[in-house]
Image (cartoon, helix red, strand yellow):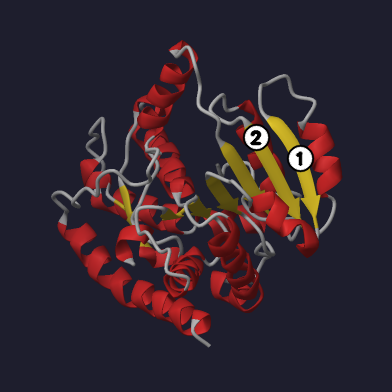
Amino acid sequence: MFRSMLVRSSASAKQSLLRRSFSSGSVPERKVAILGAAGGIGQPLALLMKLNPLVSSLSLFDIANTPGVAADVGHINTRSQVVGYMGDDELAKALEGADLVIIPAGVPRKPGMTRDDLFNINAGIVKNLCSAIAKYCPHALVNMISNPVNSTVPIAAEIFKKAGMYDEKKLFGVTTLDVVRAKTFYAGKANVPVAEVNVPVIGGHAGVTILPLFSQATPQANLSGDVLTALTKRTQDGGTEVVEAKAGKGSATLSMALGKNGVEEVLDLGPLSDFEKEGLEALKPELKSSIEKGVKFANQ
């Protein structure tokens, strides 16, 4: 479970992969399916996938409004063919043959809501979608964006286990946003170019379960303990900051966003500061509780 939750995307690896794709004489056929493509995250995500030269077929699914999104995105002059699918009757066609499935489906967070408040709605949506994935594209990589990620990833894992197709190397909780925020906030305080910054982030994707390891950040800056504590808190509360700034009009969408067989290597945590060691111990019970909540729901 923890392995799935700790995966972070590497920007440099992605860039290297894209460079190779442009220089290669033949680019492999890859189908990407986005489930929840008409939503606030789904639409910019569809745009990003349409711009990705590794994608040859882009399948956009939602319960409503998908034909319009597909028509809009389909006008972009890149190689991938775009098809929109709407309603449960077309879910199978959307998924068949998919190499990568990305799930931003569900309701967004609003002011005053926690990720746990989303659970009762989004958990059922994720459970149904993952059952379809197990049936129609069991070998696909699956990227989970739907919140609460700390619980929806375990739901997916349990559904896949029941179907006999669970592969921990192919199921990801998408938490790159935490890395993006940690880099941005650190660069501002350290007064260094943000493009040069790297900050590892471990744990889950909610509140205290998000643990940026600023002691391992590069380039190193001599920041005080109080500043690092404040940076950690702001990274953990980044989603709430956006939700409150949008005043009920949405959650984080614009700052959201692999090895071909999934996770190639799981790295250890490296040396932690005393503050980070305390944070690691503090996040474990909450992350464990969120995982158990997802597992219990999946097995009901």
Helix, strand or loop for disc 2: strand
* Quadrant, the N terminus: bottom left
User: Label 2: which residue?
Assistant: 57
Identify which amino acid the numbered label 1 is placed on: Val
What is the x, y in percent for residue 111? 67, 66
Q: Is residue 188 above or below residue 146?
A: above
What is the x, y in percent for residue 94? 69, 50
Identify which amino acid the numbered label 2 is placed on: Ser
Mark 2 neighbour density, 10 Å: few (under 14) some (14–19) many (20 or more): many
Q: Is residue 4 left or right of residue 234?
A: left
User: Label 1: which residue?
Assistant: 83
What is the x, y in percent for residue 277? 19, 62
Q: Nearer the viewer, residue 44 or 77?
A: 77
Q: Earlier in the sequence, mark 1 or mark 2?
A: 2
C-alpha separation, residue under disc 1 versus residue under disc 2: 8 Å
Residue at image point 66% right, 28% down: 80
Q: Is residue 28 visible?
A: yes
Residue at image point 45% right, 41% down: 180
Q: Nearer the viewer, residue 187 or 133?
A: 133
Q: Nearer the viewer, residue 99 or 293?
A: 99
What is the x, y in percent for residue 113? 63, 71
Residue at image point 57% right, 63% down: 135
Q: Which mark is residue 158?
A: none
Mark 1 neighbour density, 10 Å: few (under 14) some (14–19) many (20 or more): some
Residue at image point 37% right, 59% down: 167
Q: Is residue 50 above or below residue 151?
A: above
Q: Are marks 1 and 2 in contact (CB under 8 Å)?
A: yes
Tag count in the figure? Answer: 2
Question: Residue pushed farthest bottom?
Answer: 300
